[in-house]
Image: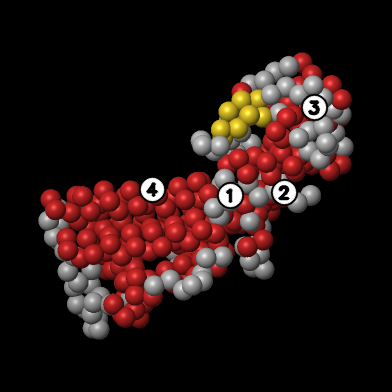
Amino acid sequence: MTPPRLLILKRLLDPSLQAQNTVEEIKNKLPTTESESIELKGVFVFLVSALETMLTDTHVYFLQAFPEAFDFKDAKFSKDEILACTLPADLIERQIEKNAITLAYGSFPDLLKAFTKSLGIAEPALDQATVDRVIEIKETRNILLHNKLVTNRLYISRAGPFRRSEDEGRKLPLTAEYVNSACESVSALIEDLQIRMRAKYSEYTRIAAFRRLWDFLFCSPLLKFDDYWRLDEEKDQISSLKQSDREHHLSSSEQSFLAVWRMHFNGWNKPQGVASLYGLVGETQQKMLWFLSTLTDFDLR
């Protein structure tokens, strides 16, 4: 059983759009925020965290749809993790989340490389000057949190060509002008990544995901997607359901899958639509279990 790709471009872009909004909010606050103030330090930390969170959340969502893009060679599962999972897919998702969090705590170049490689957007190369500026920004955040903005060996070795000191023991300034420049660099990087994701995954609309899911669940000529659903292409969603005159010819398992879909779309509860695992066997039962677990995160409405 190979599940369908349920990635939706809008959801893929949501974390980056949220991060961009955060950057704009910070920029708007800077004219009234004093250099070296605790408020400025706070928004600067928030700026870097917004970028890291955006990369992590986007990466996790993508890998849930394309798990083969994740390198499982070093994956380890504890006894508790195995016992806590209902389906094998749960183990995969937990490992993906753990790995993404680990990357976020590592070096920024490694995080960005893993992100662009997994999503297939590494080419052409990102603007290196922008990446190098963001590297220095993250390392400044690190010494702000851990060393009171005083440079140390770690900062000098990791901050790259835009490091602001060659010497250990120097306290770096944190001005509104520096944070504004940091906002510009972070925003430029996020925008570049957004453009690449839009170009690469433009065909992954919500309606396309619905169709892929439908084709995975149903292979009968009696169950053509457009015979059962009305679409709103402009809003990229299902607008309403239809009743097909072929429904009374469906098998019991097909009726079960159709009933589950309709129930999660608008609470459809016809008597013949009661889904039961007792009438399903083998891969069909496995498919139903997968379908039900998918609906915890994939909204059919």
- Please report the residue visible at 65 percent of the width from the left and 39 percent of the height from the top: 210
Q: CA distance from mark 1 to mark 4?
A: 20 Å
Question: Mark 2 or mark 4: which comes first in sequence?
Answer: 2
Q: Is residue 291 above or below residue 260?
A: below
> Which residue is at a point 79% across and 49% down the rendered structure image?
1
Tag 3: amino acid: Gln
Precedes in sequence: disc 1 or disc 3 = 1
CA–CA distance between discs 2 and 1? 15 Å
Q: Tag 4: residue type?
A: Gln
Image height check: is 67 above or below 205? below
> N-terminal of the two: label 3 or label 2?
2
The residue carrying mark 1 is: 204
Is any part of residue 215 visible from this angle? yes
Q: CA distance from mark 1 to mark 3?
A: 28 Å
Q: Do the residues under discs 2 and 1 have CB atoms within 8 angstroms?
A: no
Looking at the image, tell me whether mark 2 or mark 1 is earlier in sequence order.
2
Left or right: 33 with respect to 99?
left
> In front: 212, or 47?
212
Report the residue that reaches farthest toward the bottom.
166
What secondary structure is marked by label 2?
A: loop
Q: Position of residue 79 (x, y in %)?
A: 68, 53
The residue singled out by tag 3 in the image is 255
- Residue at image position (75%, 51%) is 2
Residue 143 appears in view: no
Q: Please name which of the two marks, 2 or 1, marks the residue nearer to the observer.
A: 1
